[in-house]
């Protein structure tokens, strides 16, 4: 997992794309906006994990800590 910010005009690094999955696809409503935190109107934040990991209970928190709303998920270890 990590913060995958991308500079405008730069292509994303697709090296690991076949090894990861988007947690929000299955646990969080992808239409929920995460930016900006004071007036959320855009969904631009994602959470990825290895394909073999199990997860559940993903959500967008409605608490302001920064310019993006936090997203959480529980992982089985």
Image: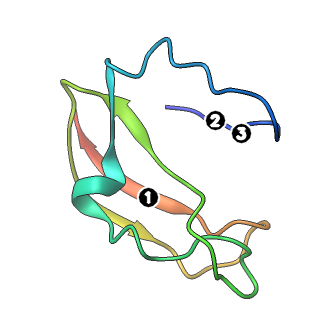
Q: Position of residue 7 (x, y in %)?
A: 82, 36
- Disc 3 designates what residue? 5
Task: Verify CB contact (< 8 Å) between mark 2 and mark 3.
Answer: yes
The answer to which of marks 1 and 3 sits earlier in the sequence is 3
Q: Which residue lies at the image location 56% right of the left edge and 82% below the top edge?
A: 62
Q: Position of residue 70 (x, y in %)?
A: 58, 64
If the image is split into quadrants, where does the C terminus sit? top left
Q: Which residue lies at the image location 70% right of the left edge and 66% below the top edge?
A: 68
Judged by depth in the image, the label closer to the viewer, 1 or 3, is: 3
Relative to 33, 10 lies left or right: right
Which circle marks residue 72 in the picture?
A: 1
> Considering depth in this image, is 14 or 25 the residue closer to the camera?
14
Relative to 25, 70 lies left or right: right
Task: Verify CB contact (< 8 Å) between mark 1 and mark 3.
Answer: no
Question: Label 3: how many residues lie within 10 Å, few (<14), some (14-19) or many (20+)?
Answer: few
Q: Position of residue 65 (x, y in %)?
A: 74, 69
Q: Which residue lies at the image location 63% right of the left edge and 27% below the top edge?
A: 12
Task: Determine whether the residue tagged by mark 1 lies in a helix, strand or loop.
Answer: strand
Q: Position of residue 39 (x, y in %)?
A: 72, 88
Q: How far is the residue under mark 1 from the one under mark 3?
A: 18 Å
- Disc 2 designates what residue? 4
Q: Quadrant of residue 45?
A: bottom right
């Amino acid at each position: 997992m990590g913060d995958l910010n991308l500079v405008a005009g730069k292509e994303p690094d697709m090296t690991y794309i076949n090894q990861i999955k988007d947690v929000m696809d299955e646990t969080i409503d992808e239409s929920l906006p995460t930016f900006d935190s004071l007036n959320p109107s855009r969904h631009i934040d994602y959470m990825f994990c290895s394909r073999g990991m199990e997860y559940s209970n993903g959500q967008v928190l409605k608490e302001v800590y920064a310019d993006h709303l936090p997203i959480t998920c529980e992982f089985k270890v």
